[in-house]
């Protein structure tokens, strides 16, 4: 394969060789180098871009991690701070409630130090008032002053914050609903109610005569000593409420109790807490008891407007938001809530307590128990199986009786948390997943330990505040969102920048590839151009040398090549020119010599010829027979000498390519006849028969008649000379395609295989083939071949003669036979 | 017209002397010239019936001689037989173009030459 390619390469001319070599040596490496360079560059570029992208992404990831960590940290910090703040607020709220309650202790003790006096009691009733925020939306906004946030005038006071004072619409409300004096039997002696001295005096030892028919304080009074105070639980009529679910969340029905924002027009829970302390006369005898029924609104007021967010306070609390404060009494019953229907109360008709809301599960147990709900709830163990997995009983919801009694509210594990956390009178917080939101819930025991409240460290009970965790780490969430947004944007930017970089690299690489392609193409063109120039410089003179050499080989020795370069080619051309000049000179000298020699030889031959021929023909007088015979011998010698001279002249013309043909349309038969006539004497002398076979329809041929006759004479003479006497010679012509074929066949000595080509060479010693000397110039066949070839034909020799070709031939022994075949083109006669 | 006067022009003494002897013996008046100039003078002064003219001659070549003679009215009708050792075809053509009536190549036998002359004798 390679060898084939190499051989093909060797056969190419110099120009393709040069171009291929230069292309292989220059352009291909250039393209390869260019390709590698571009690829590497592109690859490196892409790698760099990839690295940059990775680094960017890592940076982003780091930023994200740092962001997450810092957000987590700040969330934690914010949570802790918020938690602490809310915890503190809870504790302080509890303390303030306790203080408020303790004030009532002082007030009743002061009142107990006086003799019972309706006017005094009325006076106390009227003067003891406290502001209450108006919650009716129709009234709430009425007196609102424009609250303007202040700005600092000193720029050194950084991070200035200012909250205008609350300017909610408030009304002053008596602290007590009722102030009474009752005797030791429970009969009311003095009664201040509804802002006046009441005449509707009853016996409060009987429950049905008490507030909501639910007060049972009288039995506890007998044991009160001087200065000892009985404080009741919160007593009020239960206000029903109904919750229903919507797609947006839980809503409160309009007919329900007041529920802040959720139901601002509902009926509010109205409860009392009764303070009782004995009164002694001057003799130290217990005469009765002074009682004060604290309007529970004032207690609720402490928590009803708490909003544990940036807003801090609100007119209408929002039970649905979870951000509100509420109060539980020492028995874990709800006494203040954003939703008043959650506050535990009594049926004012029966004075019986409305049982707390149970889970459906527990409620189902109740239904199986056969007990009344009140009885069942009373007997229900506290804080058993409290879990968020439970849901409130539907029946209670439908009845609208869903007061919250922590002890049995087994759907709310936080109740247990508060209960447990306040056992030591302390405070704290915990997290709870409530309605799908993480809520912080704080608790703080209300440190009020008067009367029955002194029995536990929980005191009056406890305040709890619920807060949405998300709300108080809102800032952190905003930061988180900002960081995430920034990371997302940066990520996008990095991706964008990177894709731009990649695009740039791709464009650059494409540009480079184009550049290299163009350079390669240019280089290729330059190389091809250079190759062409070099090749023309090289091959041009060589071609001219070749052409000149070809011309010289055809006999035109007058050649000169115009080469100006001084390189090897120039020297070659110069040498060639010198050689051509020398050859031309030699040729000229040779021709001249031949001409001169021929001329100079002919002149003495003429002299001899004149003399001998004159004598033989009798122009010099009578000669005897012997002289005639001797002179005839001399004449033969003169004729052979002349023949030799003529042959030499022909040969020199053939060799010098100086043969000029005198072409004319000649009948083939004429050539054969003339030649046969010329040799007939010689043939006769040797006893040969010459048979002619020329078809009548053979076309005339455009030849030099004399030369063709001479050719045929030469062949016939050869056959005559190189055949044993009495031989047969057949002359045949035929038209085969575009050629006219002449054959001269004999049954002579033949030509050995090795001599078939040799016989056509000049001075071939034909005698070496023969057993006897025939004699000849050795030029006949050479001249014959020269003339035939000058006509554009060929001549060859075949021997021995195949018998099947010439059945008429007597062959065998010495008679091997030989055939000389001439092929002449019919139309084209070659170099005329 | 009968051929009586033959001008033989040849610088080769053996040939010219042989021809003079034989033509004289046969009854012809023979003039001889050994160079071209002499040949032209002889032709003009003697006005021979035929000229046997060699080509290679001293002073003036046979071709020139032929041209001059053929160019002059006095001599243009004299048949000129060129007899030359120059036997190449271009040489023959040159002779014929110069106006020779016949170009004979040496060597020719005496009877052959005589035949050529007698050929004009009959005309």
Image (tube, coloured by chain):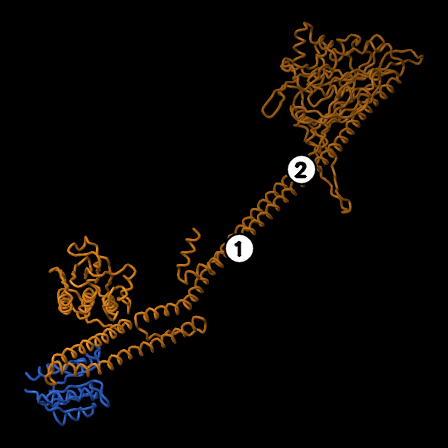
Chain colours: A orange, B blue
- Return the residue at label 1: A33
Compared with B49, A173 (above or below) is: above
Q: Chain of mark 2?
A: A
Would you say residue A168 is visible in this rendering?
Answer: yes
Instruction: Note whether A638 is above or below A802 in the view shown.
Output: below
Which residue occupies the foreground of this view, A500 or A675? Answer: A675
The C terminus of chain A, quarter of image: bottom left
* Label 2 vs label 1, nearer the camera: 1
Side of B109 relative to A186 (left or right) = left
Figure quadrant of residue A125: top right
Q: Within 10 Å of the Cα at label 2, are there few (<14), some (14-19), or many (20+) other Cα atoms?
A: many
Q: Is residue A46 above or below residue B17?
A: above
Query: Depth check: B64 or B32 in front?
Result: B32
Q: Is residue A466 left or right of residue A537?
A: right
Of all residues, the one furthest to the right in this rendering is A283
On the image, numbered disc 2 is attached to which residue?
A480
Residue A475 at least partly seen: no
Farthest residue in the top direction? A370
Does the CB distance between marks 2 and 1 fall below 8 Å?
no
Element type at mark 2: helix
In this image, A15 relative to A699: left or right? right
Residue A305 higher or lower than A765, as above or below: above
Residue A314 image position (x, y, % from top left): 70, 30
Where in the figure is residue A226, as x and y percent of width and height? 90, 14
Q: Estimate how packed mark 1 is, as few (under 14), some (14 to 19) or many (20 or more) residues with alpha carbons within 10 Å.
A: few
Q: Position of residue A704 (x, y in %)?
A: 19, 69
Residue A453 falls in which quadrant of the image?
Answer: top right
Q: Position of residue A760 (x, y in %)?
A: 27, 65
**2 or 1: tag closer to the N-terminus:** 1
């Amino acid at each position: 394969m390679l060898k084939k390619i190499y051989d093909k390469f060797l056969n190419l001319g110099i120009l393709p060789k040069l171009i291929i070599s230069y292309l292989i040596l220059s352009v291909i490496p250039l393209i390869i180098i260019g390709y590698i360079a571009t690829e590497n560059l592109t690859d490196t570029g892409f790698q760099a871009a990839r690295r940059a992208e990775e680094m960017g992404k890592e940076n982003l990831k780091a930023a994200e991690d740092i962001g997450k960590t810092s957000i987590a940290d700040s969330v934690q910090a914010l949570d802790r701070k918020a938690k602490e703040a809310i915890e503190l607020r809870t504790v302080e709220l509890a303390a303030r409630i306790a203080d408020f309650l303790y004030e009532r202790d002082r007030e009743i003790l002061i009142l107990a130090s006086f003799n019972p006096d309706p006017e005094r009691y009325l006076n106390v009733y009227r003067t003891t008032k406290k502001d209450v925020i108006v919650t009716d939306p129709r009234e709430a906004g009425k007196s609102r002053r424009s609250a303007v946030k202040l700005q600092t005038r000193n720029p050194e006071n950084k991070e200035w914050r200012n909250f205008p004072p609350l300017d909610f619409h408030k009304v002053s409300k008596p602290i007590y609903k009722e102030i009474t004096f009752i005797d030791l039997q429970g009969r009311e002696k003095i009664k201040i109610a509804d802002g006046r001295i009441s005449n509707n005096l009853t016996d409060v030892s009987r429950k049905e005569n008490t507030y909501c028919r639910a007060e049972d304080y009288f039995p506890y009074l007998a044991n009160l000593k001087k200065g000892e105070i009985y404080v009741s639980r919160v007593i009020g009529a239960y206000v029903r409420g109904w919750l229903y679910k919507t797609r947006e969340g839980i809503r409160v029905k309009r007919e329900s109790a007041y529920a802040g924002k959720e139901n601002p027009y509902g009926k509010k829970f109205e409860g009392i807490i009764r303070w009782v302390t004995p009164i002694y006369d001057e003799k130290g005898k217990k005469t009765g008891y002074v009682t004060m029924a604290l309007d529970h609104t004032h207690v609720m007021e402490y928590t009803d407007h708490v909003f544990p967010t940036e807003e801090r306070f609100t007119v209408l609390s929002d039970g649905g938001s979870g951000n509100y404060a509420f109060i539980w009494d020492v028995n874990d019953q709800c006494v203040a809530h954003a939703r008043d229907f959650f506050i535990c109360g009594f049926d004012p008709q029966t004075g019986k307590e409305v049982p707390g809301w149970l889970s459906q599960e527990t409620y189902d147990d109740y239904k199986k128990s056969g007990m009344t709900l009140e009885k069942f709830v009373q007997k229900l163990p506290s804080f058993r199986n409290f879990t968020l997995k439970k849901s409130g009983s539907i029946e209670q919801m439908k009845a609208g009786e869903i007061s919250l009694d922590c002890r049995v509210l087994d759907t709310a594990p936080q109740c247990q948390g508060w209960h447990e956390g306040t056992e030591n009178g302390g405070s704290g917080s915990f997290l709870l997943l409530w309605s799908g939101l993480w809520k912080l819930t704080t608790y703080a025991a209300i440190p009020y330990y008067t009367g029955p409240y002194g029995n536990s460290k929980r005191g009056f009970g406890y305040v709890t505040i619920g807060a949405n965790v998300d709300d108080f780490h809102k800032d952190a969430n905003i930061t988180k969102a900002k960081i995430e947004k920034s990371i997302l944007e940066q990520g996008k930017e990095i991706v964008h920048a990177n894709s731009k970089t990649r695009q740039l690299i791709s464009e650059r690489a494409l540009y480079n590839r184009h550049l290299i392609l163009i350079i390669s193409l240019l280089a290729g063109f330059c190389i091809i151009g250079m190759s062409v120039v070099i090749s023309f410089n090289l091959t041009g003179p060589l071609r001219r040398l070749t052409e000149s050499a070809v011309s010289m080989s055809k006999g035109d020795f007058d050649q000169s090549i115009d080469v100006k370069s001084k390189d090897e080619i120039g020297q070659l051309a110069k040498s060639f020119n010198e050689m051509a000049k020398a050859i031309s000179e030699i040729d000229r000298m040779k021709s001249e010599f031949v001409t001169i020699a021929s001329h100079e030889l002919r002149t003495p031959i003429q002299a001899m010829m004149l003399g001998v021929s004159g004598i033989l023909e009798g122009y010099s007088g009578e000669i005897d027979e012997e002289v005639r015979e001797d002179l005839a011998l001399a004449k033969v010698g003169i004729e052979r000498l002349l023949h030799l001279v003529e042959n030499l002249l022909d040969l020199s013309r053939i060799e010098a390519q100086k043969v000029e043909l005198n072409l004319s349309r000649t009948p083939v038969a004429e050539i054969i006849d003339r030649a046969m006539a010329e040799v007939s004497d010689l043939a006769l002398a040797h006893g040969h028969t010459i048979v002619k076979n020329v078809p009548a329809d053979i076309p005339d041929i455009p030849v030099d008649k004399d030369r063709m006759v001479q050719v045929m004479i030469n062949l016939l003479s050869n056959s005559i000379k190189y055949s044993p006497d009495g031989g047969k010679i057949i002359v045949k012509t035929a038209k085969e395609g575009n050629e006219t074929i002449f054959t001269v066949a004999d049954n002579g000595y033949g030509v050995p295989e090795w001599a078939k080509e040799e016989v056509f060479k000049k001075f071939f010693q034909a005698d070496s083939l023969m057993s006897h000397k025939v004699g000849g110039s050795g030029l006949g066949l050479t001249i014959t071949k020269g003339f035939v070839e000058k006509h554009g034909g060929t001549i060859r020799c075949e021997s021995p003669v195949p018998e099947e070709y010439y059945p008429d031939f007597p062959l065998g022994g010495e008679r091997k036979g030989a055939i000389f075949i001439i092929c002449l083109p019919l139309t084209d006669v070659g170099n005329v | 017209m009968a051929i009586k006067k033959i001008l033989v022009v040849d610088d080769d003494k053996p040939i010219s002397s042989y021809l003079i002897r034989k033509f004289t013996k046969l009854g012809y008046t023979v003039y001889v010239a050994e160079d071209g100039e002499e040949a032209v003078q002889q032709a003009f002064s003697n006005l021979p019936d035929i000229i046997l003219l060699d080509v290679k001659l001293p002073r003036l070549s046979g071709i020139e001689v032929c041209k001059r003679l053929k160019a002059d009215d006095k001599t243009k009708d004299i048949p000129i037989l060129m007899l030359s050792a120059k036997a190449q075809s271009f040489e023959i053509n040159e002779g014929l173009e110069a106006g020779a009536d016949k170009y004979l190549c040496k060597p020719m036998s005496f009877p052959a030459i005589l035949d050529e002359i007698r050929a004009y004798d009959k005309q």
